[in-house]
Amino acid sequence: MSYKLEAENINVHYGSNHVIKNVSMKLQPNTVTAFIGPSGCGKSTFLRCLNRMNDYIDLFHLDGKIKVDGKNIYDKKVRVEELRKQIGMVFQKPNPFPKSIYENVVYGLRIQGINKKSILDETVERSLQQAALWEEVKDDLKKSALQLSGGQQQRLCIARTLATNPTVLLMDEPASALDPISTSKVEELIHDLKKDLTIIIVTHNMQQAARVSDTTAFFYLGDLVEMDATKVMFTNPRETQTQNYITGRFG
Amino acid sequence: MSEVNWNRIKDRSFKYFGIGCTVFGLSVLVVFLLSIIIQGVARIDWDFITSMPSRFAEKAGILPALIGTLWILVLTAAISIPIGVASGVYLEEYGKKNRFAKFLEINIANLAGVPSIIYGLLGLEIFGRIMAMGGSILAGSCTLALLILPVVIVSTREAIKAVPDTLRQASYGLGASKWQTLSRQVIPASAGGIVTGIILAISRAIGETAPLIVVGALVFVPFVPSGPMDQFTVLPIQIFNWVSRPEKEFGVNAAAAIIILLLVTFVMNGIALYLRNRWQKKIKW
């Protein structure tokens, strides 16, 4: 069995702060993995290691290996811009560019120097359809993305990420700023996208983790406490810490 | 007296104190403007704008000074904008945030407070003598560009700092390089603030007198400068020249020239406001 993503003995320091402690995990392709844990447990930091979004932070230091399709992404030969096209990211707060819907979606292509209209048009339709936003905005692609509702903005951000054809999608609490209806739309989307992508989602919402994920990983104070099939984690976890967190006794 | 009443009195008295201060500041400005306008506005006509200076007050005009001011304005902008904006972007986006950067930051802010005549002396030595530009428009512009660089740098940094980090993250996340992120997202998003800072800085530059006198701007220029290496004068120097004369008629000329200089400054500030509103309306976070 080949894994889509393997992390081996990852340690992260911010200066003298040891924020990720010897975390290893293996993820199979076309699965959804949920990272849960109380605030400050390192789950977002770990997520950001997977597409090297922490590179620009001063004092950030990582040891260990993260392999995507068997290749170490922290290898010197890897160009981080290429990597991020392959490993897309959706953020906590919808963060569309102050541009039109169309320009938001094609941004990832334009920065690669792709400006041919037929390709761009095609990508816009495909990505918006994948993100379940096409029907709502297809007559209004020139409208500013900032005029969309929060839920629509978040789906636009997902579409924008899908435009560069990533194989892994990282989502950092993608629904925490959304209302329940928009949240369920995003969750449905995660279900649909699973057939093409490997998805990792950070969430504070236990029900959400239970609903969308195949595998759940529980982080606490920089340690990966437990990782197992979601069903097992929520019904019969090995560790009492996991049990306490999932049942809401702390966190 | 109860605590609540006391607080209300404090609240109200501060409000009236604030109103008093505002009225005082504004009325001084209004009195100044009125007295200048009453003195000078009748003197302004097409001849006044298009005539050479003269030792006869009624024949004297401001053409060389006005053209000189416009030359200085354009050249100073051309020199200070690229250098200042690029430095601001570098310091904010590329420079490491260590102790040296703090030191640099404090010193750039301090440079903005150095008296302008010091810049004049620096310009005289470096541009006038060492680089042999003499008392030319170019030497004057270089000097003024130095003078306003700190302001341009600081306002560029402030404008860039105001761009939310989520925007950068979004761009990086899609595989954009640092330069692409800057040129396609960060700089356009901060353009309103950057442009406002530049225009306010340049408005200050065209009102400067002392550094230009030191660099070697002339007081009496009976020709229109035609290139950056020409000798020149500017409106503030012309005004200074006129008010220092004993004849009353020259005082009227000075008032008229002040009105023209104020108009140039107001137009610049108007453009700054317009640009800022236009760009800020487009971008809401």
Image (cartoon, grey):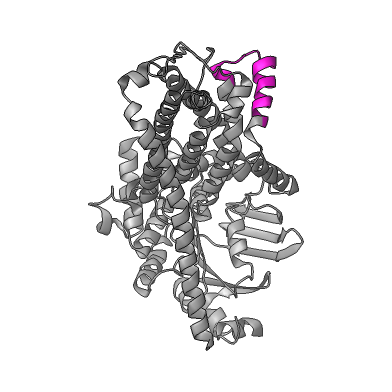
Residue A56 x/y as whole percent: 62, 50
Residue A164 horizontal/vertical position (percent)? 44, 47
As for residue A99 lying within the magenta part, the answer is no
Q: Would you say B284 lies left or right of A40 here?
A: left
Q: Is residue B218 above or below residue A99?
A: above
Residue B203: percent from left, percent from top: 48, 35
Q: Residue at x 55, y 38 (%)?
A: B152
Q: Main secondary structure of the magenta part?
A: helix
| Quarter the N terminus of chain A occupies | bottom right
Residue A184 position in % (x across, y down): 37, 72
Rendering quarter of residue A190: bottom left
Residue A180 in view here: yes
Which residue is at the far right?
Answer: A16
**Residue sitting at x 61%, y 18%:** B216
Q: Residue at x 60, y 72 (%)?
A: A39
Kindly identify the residue that appears in the image at 57 percent across and 22 percent down.
Answer: B140
Q: Quadrant of residue B56?
A: top left
Q: Looking at the rendering, in which quadrant would you find the C terminus of chain A?
A: bottom right
Between B139 and B92, which is closer to the camera in this rendering?
B139
The magenta span reads B118-139
Position of residue B41 in the picture relative to residue A89 (left or right): left
| Nearer-the-camera pick, B110 or B97 | B110
- Position of residue A42 relative to residue B209, above or below, is below
